[in-house]
Image: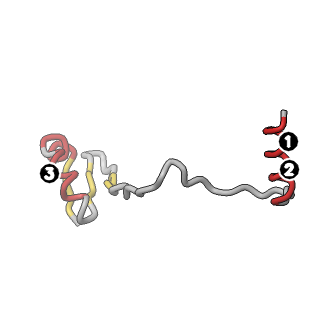
Amino acid sequence: MKVFTYSEARQNLSELLNTAQNEKVEIRRRDGSIFSIVPKTKKEKSPFDVSGIKTRATTQDILDAVRESRAG
C-alpha cells in the first residue's frame, strides 16, 4: 500500500493514479482524514446486453402480437 499526503497527491496525481491501478493507495490530510483510491474496473459490455424481465406472456402471445401488428 502506498500512502500520499494531500500535497503529494496534488503534485503527483498522474503517478498516484498509475500506482492505484496496481496497489491500494491512500491520501492522508493533516486533519487525519484518510481517503482510499480504488480503480473502477471497466466492463466490456454491449449496449444491447440488457437483462430480461419477468412476464406471463407466452411465446405464442408474442407471436400473435407480432402477426397482429403486421396485419394492420
Q: Is residue 26 above or below residue 71?
A: below
Q: Between residues 19 and 44, which one lies in front from this camera angle?
A: 44
Give coordinates of residue 13: x percent, y percent. Answer: 18, 45
Q: What residue would you read off at disc 3?
A: 15
The amino acid type found where label 2 is placed reads: Asp
Do residues under tags 2 and 1 come within 8 Å of each other at their CB atoms? yes
Q: CA distance from mark 2 to mark 1?
A: 6 Å
Q: What residue would you read off at disc 1?
A: 68
Do residues under tags 2 and 3 come within 8 Å of each other at their CB atoms? no
Residue situated furthest top in the rendering: 72
Q: Can you say which quadrant of the picture contains the C terminus?
A: top right
The amino acid type found where label 3 is placed reads: Glu
Q: CA distance from mark 2 to mark 3?
A: 60 Å
Q: Residues within 10 Å of mark 1 (few under 14, many from 20)?
A: few
Residue at 25% over, 65% down: 23
The amino acid type found where label 1 is placed reads: Glu
Do residues under tags 3 and 1 come within 8 Å of each other at their CB atoms? no
Q: What residue would you read off at disc 2?
A: 64
